[in-house]
């Protein structure tokens, strides 16, 4: 399908990955027209505060927005908001997309940064009023006023977003119960010791945490939720229910194009290229090789601001004909009230963990090792440790496990060279 030579780049999805890709294209000297299309009515904005400071009324709307209209105009970027792309067709020369409003967008190059959507509970009552989840600014705007007057809040799901919202609700004065179906909090993301420590920290602040607890239904009255029924037959009263049970990548447009997708996302290579060798994809919608040299080999989908930004930069480089493999140390953070978790690297596959500091005092670090090589740090209230390890991992360095536990010695003094190969 031929398109006009100046049709430029179409970026579908105006979240963190989308805005990062647009920025990177201009930084790389690309001057072709760009259209950035998002289905939300707002200009691209920061999502992390939505489950934390924004819910508590400490972060106002204008400060969430990345850039004003003048920024887009200066960079020659056409920003389209509140209008989702519904169909795309393309060939080696370019293509055409059509939005829900019927607008046609011609392009030479295509990037999919479509993000993800929150999973819903497949339970009776899931569509009642006062049942919330938070992914977008609109979601947060619906929940925030409810939380400020809520007496009893039940959070279904003990992942990062659920715990951040639980901490915000507790700070606003509500009685909070967190339900987690598995045997520990944050089970897919962190080590068991950090899970235990996070649970204890929330309980010290008055939050009730129920592990191995499954919701089987939501109880309604006059069209709104008043309780959560559990598998053991008990019922929890609730005037607000928040669901945080994970996300699903948005892959419908990729499937429409015939690209390879799997349940974890749009399949990409280390250059963010999809299976057609032409389209790129980045952020929460994509699954590709683990970018962390010390991480376990295999398809990986990461959900973080850093990942979305770094993979989008790789996608931009690919679009400009200067591909550079996406190879970065993953890093994350989660503010759960006054409890700050910072993670660098990936602890999956660790065979040894060193505890540095006092978990009970909420000031400690956990250093994970595999085959004697440092692969991750999880820190609570220890930013200096976190930064030292993050920088060490970025330089391919390590810290001897037999020295790391001594908190009287700064970690930066212990950094040594380490072999930096992938482990199978």
Image (cartoon, rainbow, N blue to C red):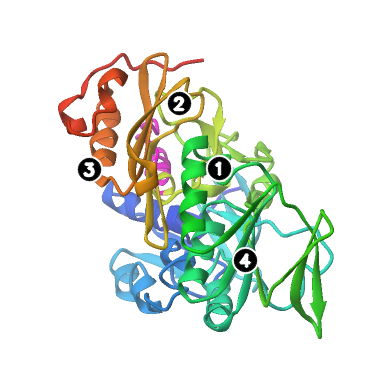
Q: Which residue is mark 4?
A: 133
User: Earlier along the polypeptide chain: callout 1 or callout 2?
Assistant: 1
Identity of the residue drawn at 43% across and 73% down: 54
Q: Which SS class for mark 3?
A: helix
374 lies above or below 384:
above
Is 388 left or right of 4, judged from the image as shown?
Answer: left
Is 8 left or right of 87, judged from the image as shown?
Answer: left
Q: Which SS class for mark 1?
A: strand
User: Earlier along the polypeptide chain: callout 3 or callout 1?
Assistant: 1
Q: Residue 316 magenta-drawn?
A: yes
Task: Quote the CA–CA distance across marks 4 and 3.
Answer: 34 Å
Q: Residue 172 appears at what percent x and percent y?
A: 48, 76
User: In terms of image quadrants, where is residue 357?
Assistant: top left
Q: Which residue is mark 2?
A: 295
Residue 418 visible in the picture:
yes
Q: Which residue is mark 3?
A: 384
Task: Quote the CA–CA distance across marks 3 and 1.
Answer: 32 Å
């Amino acid at each position: 399908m031929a398109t006009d030579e100046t049709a430029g780049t179409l970026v579908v999805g105006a979240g963190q990955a989308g805005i990062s890709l647009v920025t990177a294209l201009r930084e790389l000297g690309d001057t072709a027209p760009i259209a950035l299309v998002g289905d939300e009515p707002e200009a691209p904005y920061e999502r992390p505060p939505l489950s934390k400071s924004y819910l508590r009324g400490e972060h106002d709307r204008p400060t969430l927005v990345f850039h004003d209209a003048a920024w887009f105009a200066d960079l020659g970027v056409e920003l389209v908001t509140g209008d989702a792309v519904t169909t795309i067709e393309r060939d080696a020369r370019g293509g055409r997309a059509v939005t829900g409003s019927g607008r046609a967008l011609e392009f030479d190059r295509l990037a999919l940064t479509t993000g993800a959507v929150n999973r819903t509970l497949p339970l009776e009552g899931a569509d009642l009023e006062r049942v919330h989840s938070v992914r977008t600014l609109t979601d947060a705007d619906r929940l925030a006023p409810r939380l400020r007057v809520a007496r009893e809040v039940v959070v279904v799901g003990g992942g990062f977003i659920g715990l951040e919202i639980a901490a915000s609700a507790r700070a606003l004065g509500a009685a909070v119960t967190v339900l987690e179906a598995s045997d520990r909090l944050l089970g897919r993301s962190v080590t068991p010791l950090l899970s235990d420590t996070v649970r204890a920290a929330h309980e010290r602040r008055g939050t009730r945490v129920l592990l191995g607890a499954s919701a089987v239904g939501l109880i309604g009255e006059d069209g709104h939720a008043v309780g959560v029924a559990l598998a053991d037959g008990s019922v929890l009263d609730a005037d607000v229910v928040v669901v945080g049970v994970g996300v699903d990548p948005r892959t419908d447009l990729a499937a429409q194009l015939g690209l390879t997708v799997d349940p974890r996302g749009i399949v990409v290579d280390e250059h963010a290229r999809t299976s057609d060798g032409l389209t790129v994809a980045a952020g929460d919608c994509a699954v590709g090789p683990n970018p962390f040299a010390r991480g376990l080999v295999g398809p990986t989908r990461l959900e973080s601001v850093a990942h979305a930004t770094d993979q989008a930069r790789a996608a931009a480089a690919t679009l400009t004909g200067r591909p550079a493999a996406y190879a970065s140390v993953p890093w994350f953070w989660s503010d759960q009230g006054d409890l700050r978790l910072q993670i660098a690297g990936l602890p999956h596959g660790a065979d040894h963990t060193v505890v540095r500091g006092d978990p009970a005092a909420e000031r400690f670090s956990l250093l994970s090792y595999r085959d004697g090589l440092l692969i991750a740090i999880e820190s609570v209230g220890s930013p200096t440790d976190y930064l030292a390890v993050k920088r060490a991992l970025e330089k391919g360095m390590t810290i001897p496990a037999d020295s790391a536990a001594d908190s009287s010695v700064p970690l930066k003094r212990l950094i040594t060279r380490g072999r930096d190969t992938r482990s199978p």
